[in-house]
Image (cartoon, rainbow, N blue to C red):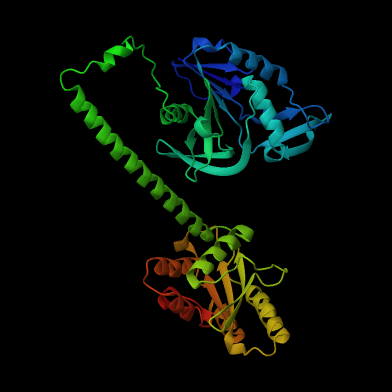
Amino acid sequence: MYQIVLYSLEEVEEQHAKYQYSPLSDPKSFDKYAVNFIDMRDERIWEYKDYRDDGIDCIEDIKSIGKLVQASQKATIVIMLPQNIVYAYGLKHNGEYEFNKELKAKIPFLEMSVKILSDTKRRLEVVFGNTETMIGEKAINSAFFFKEAQEEAILKSSDHKTVALKHGNIIYTGLDLENLKDMENFLRKVGIATEQKRDNTPEWLKEVNMFDDEKQGEVIQSNQVQIEECQQEIEKAEQALKRNLRYKSILYTQGDELVEVVFEILSEMLGVDLSNFEDKKKEDFLFEICGKTVIGEVKGVTHNVKSENISQLDVHYQSYLEENQEKNARNVYAWLIMNYQRKKPINERESVHENQIRLAERNGSLIIGTPVLLNLYEKYKNKEITKEECLGKLSKKGLLRELDL
């Protein structure tokens, strides 16, 4: 049987005969259970009525649990860190908090609280960073991971960050384990059986080889190697899928997040370096390639392409030509890369209106929708098209269409 210690039993939605739920203020002895989960994810744990930002109201409960942890001799204890939730302090008369900070701004305080909870003298080094880890068939998020802890690291995320480590009988994790199934899958992932069975077999008996013991041992060893090789392939595939999701994010994002991924795509597809581009709050990008100058805007909007979007690009385009009169306008490309109607599925987005296409043609600029940009990039990644051919397709005016690829 397992115990789950959480802030309040009011939040318990699942009941299971194998699980004992206990409030943070009144947990049962840990050694009564094979595994104890201490859930620190509730926002109410991270509140402080005082106007200083150096404590939490339930600190005495945390200290008491620390004593239970110290007294435990055989139980496995899993401490579940919170996500990047809000730490609130300074309670006003109306019941609201005057101040709040994200926990990522209070990492030393988070480390100290977990240290008190686990009653340990070792330092737990926590780092903010959103990661995903496959647990069972589900991608589990984590807002915090741990600084490399060598042999203590027992689980890494898809981008090789330590999201669970073990010290003695205590497991620390930043994974957002939302339900009983997540918790059981997590235990399996880190090598803890979800059903504890007593094994009375003496160790020396395992050294007595009889019947086909050696043959079966060889089968296990051979298949274990295959499992490890398959696991490596799975991890590579997960990384590739995550990378693909990042590219596809330009179909729904906006702002800096959109610009960052568009820059990555342009840099690889065209062989240009945009890492040193200095944003002077004018155009979003400016670079030289094959004797051409490319100036552009990147936008993510919920509406369709508007004339004002094209006109804004034209202002940057004309300003550049005025400041660089030695440039031939035919060698200066103006690109408007737009994730328009970004909240709609691709097949429900409207076509760019002919009025906007004609305006772009008159201004000598090119409208590039992010779905078309992705398809062009996919052709480049699949070696169906070269860098030079990509640039050629991007040298037209008006609107880049699927038929142009």
Q: Is residue 340 visible?
A: no
Q: Residue at x 51, y 83 (%)?
A: 396
Give the answer, above or below, for where 361 lies relative to 303: below
Q: Residue at x 62, y 21 (%)?
A: 118
Give the answer, above or below, for where 194 lies relative to 334: above
Residue 313, quarter of the rendered image: bottom right
Give coordinates of residue 172: x percent, y percent.
Answer: 55, 28
Residue 65, quarter of the rendered image: top right
Question: Horizontally, is 288 left or right of 212 in the view?
Answer: right
* Residue most extreme to the left: 211
Q: Residue at x 63, y 41 (%)?
A: 128
Between 237 and 161, the one nearer to me in the picture: 161
Give coordinates of residue 210: x percent, y percent.
Answer: 18, 17
Quadrant including the N terminus? top left
Between 283 and 350, the one nearer to me in the picture: 283
Give the answer, above or below, for where 219 lies relative to 389: above
Give coordinates of residue 346: x percent, y percent.
Answer: 47, 62
Q: Residue at x 34, y 39 (%)?
A: 228
Q: Is residue 251 visible?
A: yes
Counting every numbered tag in the picture gives: 0
Give coordinates of residue 271: x percent, y percent.
Answer: 51, 71
Between 298 and 263, the one nearer to me in the picture: 263
Question: Horizontally, is 223 left or right of 335 in the view?
Answer: left
Quadrant including the C terminus? bottom left
